[in-house]
């Protein structure tokens, strides 16, 4: 009887120690390391991209455009995230001017990327579709080929030298704008595997 009671005390003590260890570890993860793990999770699932500063259009005195900026788009598909592949393929083919056969062929890969470029009107119906990822670039164009070299070379003074750049102070510096977007699922897996390999 005494031996059985002793065993019960040993088992109960072991359970109590195990529960105490779990509580301490949970408190450590939640309270002390919670912010670190949250940052890791966000870095694994999202991308932060520095946005280029938009540049306005330039016109001459008669309203003829001399320099314009247009936003172009590139389209990517993650086959594992497409909910209705057939409907998405038909929509993409119709909007992007691509053949359904070519889209389906590329969807056999882990990730299908179409460089384009595509316009905002073309990709508008694809926004919010599961498994479709849009990226964009700002492209500067010069309709007048004779005017483009003068714009690209920058302003020049009468001696032919470029004017000095204005001095910047700490108060005039600013953080460039960023855009945060979701990573495709295959990139989340590859990021996690690289991190695991680096820590092992």
Image: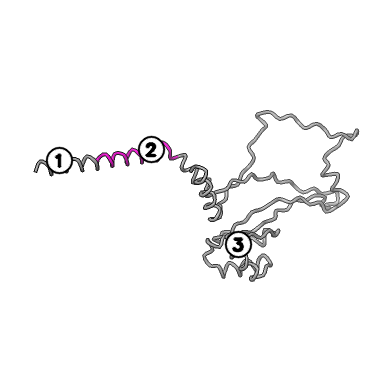
The residue wearing badge 1 is: 6
The residue wearing badge 2 is: 28
**Is 11 situated left or right of 195 in this image?**
left
Count numbered badges in the picture.
3
Q: Which span is picked out in magenta? A: 16-34
Query: Residue at position x 77%, y 49% from top?
Result: 57
Q: Position of residue 45 (x, y in %)?
A: 52, 50
Q: Nearer the viewer, mark 3 or mark 1?
A: 1
Q: Nearer the viewer, residue 90 or 105?
A: 105
The residue wearing badge 3 is: 126
Q: Nearer the viewer, residue 163 or 6?
A: 6
- How far is the residue under mark 2 from the one under mark 3? 43 Å
Whether 167 is drawn above or below 194: the answer is: above
Q: Position of residue 193 (x, y in %)?
A: 51, 49
50 is within the stretch colored magenta: no
Q: Nearer the viewer, mark 2 or mark 3?
A: 2
Ranked by sequence position, the earlier of labels 3 and 1 is: 1
Mark 1 nearby-residue class (10 Å; few <14, some 14–19, many ≥20):
few
Q: Position of residue 139 (x, y in %)?
A: 74, 51
């Amino acid at each position: 009887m005494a031996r059985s009671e002793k065993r019960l005390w040993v088992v109960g003590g072991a359970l109590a120690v195990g529960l105490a260890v779990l509580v301490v570890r949970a408190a450590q993860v939640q309270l002390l390391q919670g912010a670190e793990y949250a940052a890791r999770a966000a870095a694994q699932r999202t991308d932060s991209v520095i946005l280029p500063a938009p540049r306005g259009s330039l016109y001459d005195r008669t309203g003829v455009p001399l320099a314009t900026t247009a936003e172009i788009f590139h389209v990517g598909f993650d086959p594992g995230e497409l909910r209705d592949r057939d409907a998405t393929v038909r929509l993409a083919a119709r909007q992007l001017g691509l053949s359904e056969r070519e889209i389906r062929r590329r969807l056999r890969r882990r990730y299908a990327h179409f460089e384009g470029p595509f316009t905002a009107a073309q990709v508008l119906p694809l926004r919010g579709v599961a498994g479709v990822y849009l990226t964009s670039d700002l492209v500067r164009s010069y309709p007048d080929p004779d005017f483009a070299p003068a714009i690209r070379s920058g302003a020049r003074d009468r001696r032919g030298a470029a004017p000095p750049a204005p001095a910047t102070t700490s108060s005039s510096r600013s953080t460039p704008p960023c855009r945060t977007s979701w990573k495709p699922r295959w990139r989340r897996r590859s990021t996690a595997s690289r991190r695991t390999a680096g820590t092992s």
